[in-house]
Image: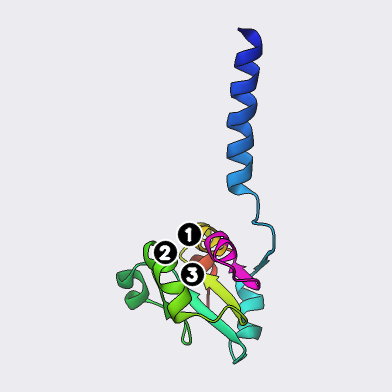
């Protein structure tokens, strides 16, 4: 019985840690680094916030594809051979989106740490 408790605790910790670790193969950048990339035409910029959040404030050049629609729209609206830079409000949804894009076969994915909360023009 004691052994089972240890296994349950270990599994719980594994899933918690895995959730917060950066996704393998995803580059993480700061908003300062993002500013140097914005004029790069070889990159695709995606904001995964809701349309209302995007309308309220967004960075010019970013396309709004809400996280809930990303898996359905990614193959139609994004090119797999071009880098995808993903942002959200705080960095949590964009981290999920980055993982989702990697699972969909996108090879060059970048997540903006801190999201729009860290952005200041």
Q: Position of residue 48 (x, y in %)?
A: 44, 68
Residue drawn at x 59%, y 22% is 8
Q: Position of residue 35 (x, y in %)?
A: 61, 82
* First-in-chain label (1 vs 2): 2
Q: Is residue 20 above or below residue 85?
A: above
- Foreground: 14 or 74? 74
Mark seen at residue 67: 2
Q: Is residue 59 above or below residue 12?
A: below
- Find the residue positioned furthest to the top: 1
* First-in-chain label (3 vs 1): 1
Relative placement, left or right, of 28 versus 99 is right
Q: Position of residue 51 (x, y in %)?
A: 32, 72
Q: Looking at the image, can residue 17 be seen?
A: yes
Q: Which residues are magenta?
A: 99-112
Residue drawn at x 62%, y 70% is 110
Q: Position of residue 39 (x, y in %)?
A: 60, 91
Q: Secondary structure at mark 3?
A: helix
- Foreground: 73 or 56? 73
Residue position for label 3 = 116
* First-in-chain label (2 vs 3): 2
Q: Could you tell me which quadrant the N terminus lies in?
A: top right
**CA gap, disc 1 to disc 2?**
7 Å
Q: Secondary structure at mark 2?
A: helix
């Amino acid at each position: 019985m004691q052994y089972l408790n240890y296994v349950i605790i270990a599994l719980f910790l594994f899933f918690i840690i895995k959730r917060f670790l950066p996704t393998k193969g995803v580059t993480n950048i700061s908003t300062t680094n993002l500013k140097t990339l914005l004029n790069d035409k070889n990159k695709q910029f995606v904001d995964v916030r809701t349309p209302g959040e995007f309308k309220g404030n967004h960075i010019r050049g970013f396309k709004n594809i809400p996280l809930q629609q990303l898996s359905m729209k990614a193959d139609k609206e994004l090119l797999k051979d071009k880098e995808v830079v993903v942002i959200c409000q705080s960095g949590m949804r964009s981290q999920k989106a980055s993982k989702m894009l990697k699972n969909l076969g996108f090879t060059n994915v970048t997540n903006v740490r801190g999201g729009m909360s860290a952005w200041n023009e």
